[in-house]
Amino acid sequence: MKNLSKTLICAVMALCCTTLMAGNGPKWLDNAVFYQIYPSSYMDSDGNGIGDIPGITSKLDYIKSIGVTAIWLNPVYESGWMDGGYDVKDYYRVDPRFGTNSDIVKLFEEAHKRGIKVIMDLVAGHTSNENPWFLQSMEKDSNLRYSDYYIWTDEISEKDKADIKLRHSQPNPKSSTIGTFVEANAPRAKYYYKNYYEAQPALNFGFANPDPNHPWEQPVDAPGPKAVWQELRNIMVFWFEKGADGFRVDMAQSLIKNDPDHTVTSEMWKGFTAWIHEHYPDNVLLAEWSDPEVSLPAGFNVDFFLPWRSATGYTKLILPEPYGRHATCYFNKAGKGEVKEFVEYYARTLKTIGDIGYMAPQTSNHDIQRPNAYTRNTMDQLKVAITFFLTLRSIPFIYYGDEIGMKYNENAPEKEGSREVFSSGFVNERAGSRTPMQWTDGVNAGFSTCAPEDIFLPVDTDGGTITVETQEKDPESLLNYVRKILALRQESAAMSNLGDWEYVSDPDQPYPMVYKRISGDELYVIALNPSGRKVSAKFPTLGRSGAEAFSTVGKASYRFNRKGCDTIEIGPVSAVIYKMTH
């Protein structure tokens, strides 16, 4: 591995022309708040029932009003639409359903006028099987330009053959993640290596530890992998020059194969991200990696919490039972959740990463259920959950519509690969989190002028209450609650992305959750009780004489220095942010 890593570094140096490390990233991240938009579902400007880029541009003033400073767009490239845009046919062209390249350049320009950055989604690990690169790689001549952009073989193991058979026994093999290879019977070879679904052939970034018995496992410094890495750089430069402010890299840890500890993957990213940070110092890279202790030292500026990485304890906090294996979650009125695993992970990771980058919780995203799901469905419950998301030491990511409490629609029809089937047998119905943004009351909730039967996915405004129009008028709405907390993040050093975080209450007594944010002499205490019962917490006195409630959901009280302890009592489904005073 040591010699191989040296080879990798040399290869990356030759490609990127530098070995400069990334550093802390651009200054604008220190106060950033991101807003994730699924483009098909945000705003339809031409009445065809599908959202588009001009529609997003038309809503920039609203986005700014929330307190957002940056937008992350899910893929807008020309796509085969087998997996919601994550099967790319052309990385250099906007899909016609969304508009044109000129439309997205206008979006960049109008966003920048309002002080908003725009981050694109980079599907780095695979393409569509309709991509011209892949179609050329299928040809018998193996010395064409794109021949080695993918991984082809005529021989696979018996286990791999069994996986193919098992996948094809599923009701819809195309939506199954089972196995590694796809039988194509192309002139080039019989099988290709997939990255996720059958329609997503893996790009060939090489193998960290090539098996000499597998000639199709090319080393990372072979011509094919080097050309793919160069292509990735070309894509980024193309969009940087058009005005994009960075990328969120899909499945960033998965590019190099046979690299279980991601050592080689990290080495390659170090060189690549260093090149970006030298030539585009105000631009950022966000990793879908969910391991900031690895991804941030590799040069990424931000990494997410993701629910499928169980070591974070995050799944047990947020996701309702139907999603996964946990019988309860913390943010549920049943009050049977846990917090210790998350607290220990979060505190350790903050200490490890220091100031080299940021972790980022998401209110939800295009792959997981929204906070408004199943029995967690009242505005008070959603306010308690959103308080958690927006008061951590991190960069907040708000998924469009979560600021008004949009529902996860468990009955939404499958749409463009939204039904995800895992090898464990678990099925994730993602369409329910991709329903159109709800602007006003009415049949299409102000999203589109199309006939109701032509709308991208169904809407549910709960009688008009879950719309921007209604919540704009209500000072106690979830939307205005979000705005209030985000304004505090901008005004307060302690509550900002840089303010320190420390857990205060006993993690073995999970309800309530109490933690503090601090910077210099400025101190805030946040207490959360999503359970349906009144609870209290005692903790060593913080040495302050006053607690001014900046915001309160439900009921809470603070008592000082009782036998050396401070005490917070907090009612059912309640949350409070205290500004501590002398």
Image (cartoon, rainbow, N blue to C red):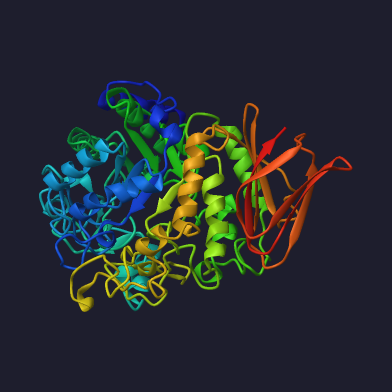
The residue shown at (46%, 72%) is 425
Residue 386 at what x, y percent from top left? 52, 54
The residue shown at (20%, 38%) is 109
> Which quarter of the figure is the C terminus placed in?
top right
Residue 428 at what x, y percent from top left? 42, 68
Q: Residue 481 vs residue 414: left or right?
A: right
Residue nearer the viewer, 36 or 211? 36
**Quarter occupied by residue 82:** bottom left
Residue nearer the viewer, 228 or 518? 518
Residue 221 at what x, y percent from top left? 29, 33
Q: Residue 405 vs residue 256: left or right?
A: right
**Quarter occupied by residue 456:** bottom left
Q: Is residue 437 above or below residue 35?
A: below
Residue nearer the viewer, 486 or 550? 550
Residue 540 at what x, y percent from top left? 80, 40
Q: Is residue 134 above or below residue 405?
A: above
Which residue appears farthest toward the right when viewing the image? 563
Residue 152 seen from this side = yes
**Quarter occupied by residue 563:** top right
